Image (spheres, rainbow, N blue to C red):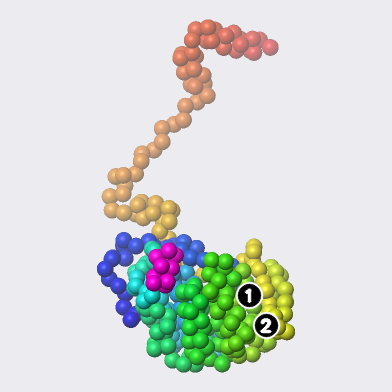
Amino acid sequence: MTAPIADQSAEQLPRPTRLSEVKGWFFTADQLLFDWFLARQRDRSEPGDLLELGAYMGKSAIFLGARRRAGERFTVCDLFDSPAEDVSNSREMRKSYATLTRRAFEANYLAFHEELPTIVQGLSSIVSDHVDEGSVRFAHIDASHLYEHVHGDILAVRELLTGSGVVVMDDYRAEHCPGVAAATWQAVANEGLRPICITGTKFYGTWGDPEPLQEALLEWIGARGDIWHEVQYVNGAPLVRLSAKGAEEPAHPVSRYRSTGARGAQRAAAQAPGASAARPGPRPPFPSRGALRRVALDVLPPVLTRAVMNARKRARTR
């Protein structure tokens, strides 16, 4: 399922020159947290693969793919162009993701990476057929907004995560998708999911022990100094809440098309065969101030011309 769809050539698709040009919502606080969790796992040599349920145009997938270590597998599961199997999900797809296509995702991803991730095109409920149990260290759930589907995604990811794996829930508090909030907090209350931290858009949790992660996270936040945070308690358990407005974003993957902006296009045009014939000639010299005065006197009405001449004579005799 990893082969690109070839019904539209790459030349016809947009070529993002930076991550910010890829459509989607992936704010600074969450970029920083994705980077921090993945870097901590790397530094501690924690094993496991990466997983994303729901990819839209690939913004967070591109970011995740840049943090994949050698030998690891990154799986992306999304319906893309496929029809949903139920009326409610089909209605949501038409309303929220009418322009979503697999080839657009692939074009965006390949602008930043040499090869595609493992793509599972279909409902997120089938992801367990393609990802081994206990093999995932970091999972991002951003697929359906309907309670039944999100609840199923959470239960599936619980089986796929390693013992210390981290799951991220998107839109856990957005007013337009209360089903995500219901499924997220139900998992906390009834399914053993333990909160680590929250941002304005995403919930971070684990079925392992959250305390070491929270302690290390608070130490990192304190050392940075540009991230606002507080610690609240939910049913007696600590929960870190943070915001990163104005904070510096982590390193972004670099696009292969980064030099095709306006300046790059000008350079390419200048270097193209036959470009010298199209180059403009040297600019004519700009007229001197005296020449401009003479032209003005020639075109002004006689009354104004005499007034100007008299004023100049008075100025010279002073």
Q: Residue furthest front?
A: 87
Query: To which residue does mark 2 refer?
Result: 214
Q: Amino acid at mark 1?
A: Ile
Quadrant where the image shows the N terminus: bottom left
Q: Residues in magenta?
A: 87-97
Query: To which residue does mark 1 refer?
Result: 198
- What is the total number of numbered labels drawn onto the structure image? 2
What residue sits 63% from the left and 82% below the top? 195
Note whether residue 41 is visible: no
Whether 286 is drawn above or below 257: the answer is: above
Q: Is residue 4 magenta?
A: no
Q: Main secondary structure of the magenta part?
A: helix
Q: Amino acid at mark 2?
A: Gln
Between label 1 and label 2, give the one nearer the viewer: 1
Determine the CA span between mark 1 and mark 2. 11 Å
Q: Is residue 210 left or right of residue 252?
A: right
What residue sits 46% from the left and 18% below the top? 295
Which quarter of the picture shows residue 164?
bottom right
Mark 1 residue element: strand
**Which of marks 2 and 1 precedes in the sequence?**
1
Give how far across and how far down residue 50 sits, in percent: 48, 83
Note whether residue 132 is visible: yes
What residue sits 29% from the left and 45% below the top? 277
Mark 2 residue element: helix
What residue sits 44% from the left and 31% below the top? 285
